[in-house]
Amino acid sequence: MTDLGFPLAILAELTHRCPLQCPYCSNPLALEAASAELSTAEWKAVIAEAADLGALQIHFSGGEPTARRDLEELVAAAAAAGLYTNLITAGVLLSRERLAALAEAGLDHVQLSFQDSEAAGCDRIGGYKGGFEKKLDCARWTVELGLPLTLNMVVHRQNLEHLPEMLALAEELQARRVEIAHVQYYGWAYLNRAALMPTREQLEDATAVVEAARERLKGVLVIDYVVPDYYARRPKSCMGGWGRQFLNISPAGKVLPCHAAESITKLTFDRVQEKSLREIWEHSPAFNAYRGTDWMPEPCRSCERKEIDWGGCRCQAFALTGEAGTIDPACALSPLHDALQALATTESATDEGSFTYRSRKAGEAAERLPERIDS
Ligand code: SF4
Ligand code: FES
């Protein structure tokens, strides 16, 4: 057996509850109910198992993780287990007192999302009125409490024109890092693809803005930049390879190789209530399905990049072709690559502006996803 290593980072999706309704949410279309969520004791057991397995970091996410009243207790458990703790939050439910209590419990880092650089866009895209002002407060409190702050900005056709202002906001709020992440198209984002897809010109402009800002802000602000795969020539190394460095635990305890893995409807996933995390990591059929390089078809199998990008993204391959074990169409060596770029160009030129916002009801109704490129 190849050396499995261990999951460096755990994404703990504590809940799918969230006051925001972003149309590119990374949660599955079928949101898990509050009544199905793991209990405090179950999460604490999972945290201890993750540390035992060798994990170094835990990201508390959701939905909105601060919707869980026991978040302080879970942060304290993770800190006591020696894990680096990161809170991924929309910020709108936090008070200064609660943030201070989380810092006191051992929180190491805050990653705060903004949907735009100004109130109207931020509140419209997130589907939450008054959210922008609350986020500003949250950012200021984070810095006042001495916690490192990362701003997370998801960019797309409807907010890319504000990219310079987004970077200025990160600077003004004294963030140490900003992640400018073009939307990746699975789940909710796949459903809203025509309303989100940037034009190639927008992408080129954005890349130039980021490169200039990186130069200007060297030593002040770290800028991470995630490009949209649909315009790429080679795919990203998604999750650093399936089942290599990362695992995700859903609110109800399903253990997934990535946050979007449930979109691959042919796979089934083990639960922490039934098996140990170690057993799942090492033996789960879902983790082993696309681990390493043995599963790869040509041209990946004989490609020099196969241990660099690991054949790209399984969820994207599945969404676009109905087959997860195939070359990611984002790769120029895929026979579907030209069709993917043509689709991106066409969708970016539509005047589709309205979103299907994330909600339980919309998820249940969303049976029809946009066309696949192999059909
Ligand atoms: Fe990556 Fe496969 Fe493309 Fe090679 S052929 S660059 S391994 S996706
Ligand atoms: Fe699942 Fe890329 S998001 S493998």
Image (cartoon, rainbow, N blue to C red):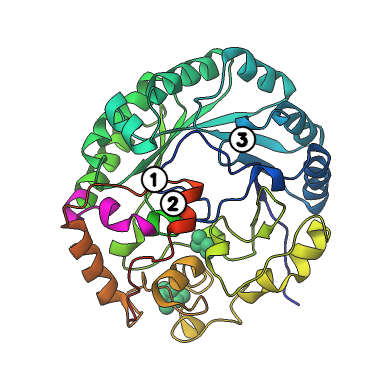
Asked which secondary structure carries label 2, the reply is helix
Nearest to viewer (mark 1 / mark 2) = 2
Which residue type carries mark 3? Pro
Nearest to viewer (mark 3 / mark 1) = 1
Q: Would you say the beta carbon of the disc 2 residue lies within 8 angstroms of ligand 2?
A: no
The residue tagged 3 is: 65
Precedes in sequence: disc 3 or disc 1:
3
Q: Is residue 189 left or right of residue 266?
A: left
Residues 193 and 206: in front is: 193
What is the crowding at mark 3: few (fewer than 14 residues within 10 Å), some, or many (at least 20)? many
The residue tagged 1 is: 357
Q: Is residue 201 magenta?
A: yes
The residue tagged 2 is: 362
Question: Is there any visible trace of residue 217 in the rendered image?
Answer: no
Asked which secondary structure carries label 1, the reply is loop
Q: Position of residue 88 (x, y in %)?
A: 56, 36
Query: Label 3, label 1: how many angstroms apart (C-alpha)?
Result: 19 Å
The quadrant of the image that shows the C terminus is: bottom left
Which residue type carries mark 2? Ala
What is the number of callouts on the image? 3
The quadrant of the image that shows the N terminus is: bottom right
What is the crowding at mark 2: few (fewer than 14 residues within 10 Å), some, or many (at least 20)? some
